[in-house]
Image (cartoon, grey):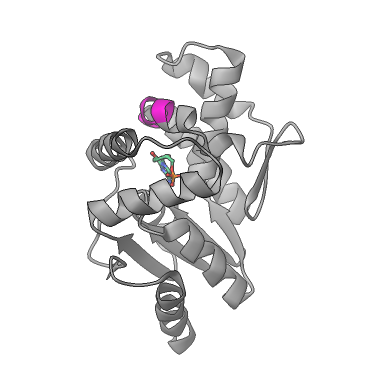
Amino acid sequence: MIVAIDGPAGSGKTTVAEQLAKRLGFSFLDTGATYRVLTYSALESGINLESEEELTSLAKGLDLKIDNNKVYLKDTDISKEIRKPRIDKNISKIVGFNKVRKVMNQLQRKEAGGKNYVVEGRDITTVVFPDAEFKFYLDANQKIRVKRRVQQLLKEGEAVNQQEVADDLIKRDRADKNRKIGSLRLTEDTRYIDTTNLLIPEVVEKLFAIVREK
Ligand code: DC
């Protein structure tokens, strides 16, 4: 069974998905992490970030392993590196290429398809698993989403410029919502949940109750 969760950066979906998966006894897939690994790999290998062809072949050969909230590239744990601001700054361009997305969609379906998984991202309810048994869209107002991202970076020991974080988030929102393929959008068959005034455990509880009820 697949529980699909989409939403913008800072909506709390990664933490919620991880905790919900634990509650349900499911595995958890953060598809944003798969794009982050690709971006990290592209930056490290020095390939042309403007080239859809080069990025697509990099995606095809990506030696990526995901184990819940840990990600490995060629067996090296890069879970921390993929959360750095340099990834945030470069990722939007890369995830905008259709051929790259197709390869990544396949990788995500292969990882979670046919198993019990909570999968979160931007196009999970619409493109990757449109027929998921449960589909949620988590949202929150922009101010609180910036605040959450700042807190997350501080927790990871990063030097934080609040304005820069806000600018990056707004830029990524715009790119995510306006992509031709795989854009972030709410469909009629997906349940919308505003997390602005909710704590993480409250959101987890809400989703858990809906899944359990069925
Ligand atoms: O969820 P996140 O912030 O870690 O995602 C990083 C970037 O990857 C984000 O800017 C949008 C992109 N992304 C995507 O295009 N499709 C997904 N399914 C997940 C993430």
Write the residue at 43% across / 33% down: 88
Establish if 71 lies above or below 151. above
Q: Nearer the viewer, residue 69 or 113?
A: 69
Q: Is residue 38 left or right of residue 61?
A: left
Q: What is the quadrant of residue 169 in the picture? A: top left
Quadrant containing the N terminus in the rendered view: bottom right
Question: Residue 197 in the image: x percent, y percent?
Answer: 29, 70
Q: Is residue 25 left or right of residue 74?
A: left
Outermost residue, bottom side: 213
Image quarter for ligand 1 equals top left
90 in magenta: yes
Q: Main secondary structure of the magenta part?
A: helix
Establish if 144 lies above or below 71. below
Q: Nearer the viewer, residue 57 or 36?
A: 36
Q: Which residues are magenta?
A: 89-96
Write the residue at 34% across / 55% down: 7
Q: How many marks overall?
A: 0
Question: Residue 111 in the image: x percent, y percent?
Answer: 62, 50
196 in magenta: no
Write the residue at 41% across / 63% down: 131
Q: Is residue 210 left or right of residue 158?
A: left
Q: Nearer the viewer, residue 126 or 203?
A: 203
Q: Nearer the viewer, residue 193 or 131?
A: 193
